[in-house]
Amino acid sequence: MRYPFADRVKMFKSSAVRELLSIIQQGDVISFAGGLPFEDYFPIGEVEKAYQKVFASGKSSLQYGLTEGYLPLRSWLSDSMKTKGIESKADNILLTTGSQQAIDLFTRVMISPGDVILTENPTYLAAIQVFQSFEAQIVPVDGDKDGMDPEDLEQKMKKLRPKFVYVVPTFSNPEGKVWSNERREHLLKLAYKYNVLIFEDDPYGEIQFKQDQTYTPLAAMDEGRTHVMYTSTFSKTVVPALRTGWVTGPYQVIRMMAQAKQCADLHSSSLDQQALYYLVEDFDLKGHIEMLRVEYYQRMTIMQDYLKSIPTSSISWVEPQGGMFLWVTLDEQVDTTQLLMEAVKNGVAFVPGAPFYVGNPQLNTLRLNFTHSTPEKIKLGMDRLALVLSKLQSGTESPIIV
Ligand code: PMP
């Protein structure tokens, strides 16, 4: 049978990273590919206790809930976001199935086929997938280590009148980069000038290694709360399996997204939301995040020290100030998709940079995750990677030259 799928599905692409992960999970390969947190840091006992509390609270905890999500958790979020300078009432918060669903719902209510979305380049792969599935025209904006290039951004805003600008300004995926406060202010200024919405995706903002700098979320700078949608998640700070994220922004947009959510799933699991509420009430989440910052910083440093020790000038990266990723650029002639085959043969894996790009990919880039492996595994994996890279340097491996 030839199934009569909608035209839209032609735009669906399965995630290159997910496909890659399934190959890599075989054998003795040390994987720096997935963007996964470290499992030993999951507060499993606390999560279990939180669910026990939900069940002890009676049968009504198993009933249908509100589309917007469990109110006590939204109120907690409203308070907690104040510490980041984001003023948002519980009514303006929609709980979602991870921040991934927030990206999907927002795109669903904003984009008709052909509408323009401006993005960084490279940018978060699964956001590209969402934008493509709604047949958006994704237009990359030039950038450097501090954020989007101001001139290119203004030119594209003026000429293309995008529906929105999608950014991950704090410890991005894949680049691990953080926007300067000047670039943030500039983006917001242009958003007001050209009346364009910003979608700020902030899953990693809490994982800031050193507290010597303050990176203000765009949502906190948007004083009238008119131009920035902000999403974040419990996936990186608590556990991803709870699939709980949230989105906040102008009330009209949140209302529209709630209607779209009704179509998609009525509401996300209220059982999980209630458990999360008990968890954040009882658990020292602040202390937990502090521990994650210290441990992940240590792992990033080990990985970075290995990179520094590789005897070649044609390898560069910007030291991440937080998040989960190190973004590496190799010699221009290297194609990291092919290099991956060689790396896997040597027992180590990464994600080639190409799928994170809109338009022409920079083939000599790769993403390394430093949070999922123990320091020992990082050392072993980086030994293997260093070997592959140094062979490259000495010219004993040839298939990776394009
Ligand atoms: N945005 C970015 C930039 C991400 O890296 C991720 C997870 N990898 C998400 C959104 C989605 O996270 P979740 O759905 O688990 O909240």
Image (cartoon, rainbow, N blue to C red):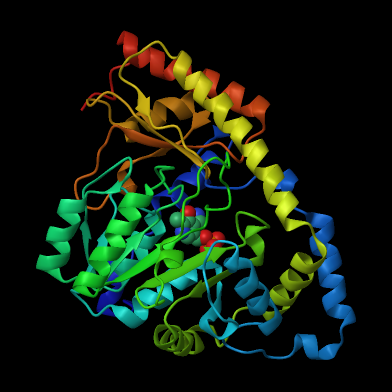
In percent of width and height, residue 44 lies at: 79, 55
Q: Position of residue 28 (x, y in %)?
A: 61, 30
Quadrant position of residue 103: bottom left
105 or 350: which is nearer to us? 105
When the figure is inspected, residue 240 is found, relative to residue 375, above or below; the finding is below
Which residue corresponds to the image point at 66% horizontal and 37% vertical from the top-left?
A: 294
- In the displayed structure, would residue 164 be above or below residue 142? below
**Residue 249, x across and y down, in percent:** 44, 77
**Which residue shows up at 60% across the image and 28% down it?**
378
Query: Which of the image's four quarters has the C terminus?
Result: top left
Residue 401 picture location, percent across and down = 24, 23
Query: How many numbered marks have been drawn onto this rendered protein structure?
Result: 0
Q: Is residue 29 visible?
A: no
User: Based on the displayed image, in which of its 4 quarters is residue 224 positioned?
Assistant: bottom left
For the residue pair 181 and 125, the one nearer the viewer reads as 181
Quadrant location of the N terminus in the rendered image:
bottom left
Residue at (44%, 83%) from the top-left corner?
Answer: 257
Indicate the quadrant where residue 58 lies: bottom right
In the foreground, 68 or 181: 181
Q: Is residue 270 visible?
A: yes
Q: Is residue 320 left or right of residue 97?
A: left
Considering every residue shown, the one lying at the far left of the view is 159
> On the rendered structure, is 370 left or right of 230?
right
The image shows residue 216, relative to residue 112, as above or below, that is above
* Most foreground residue, 344 or 3: 344
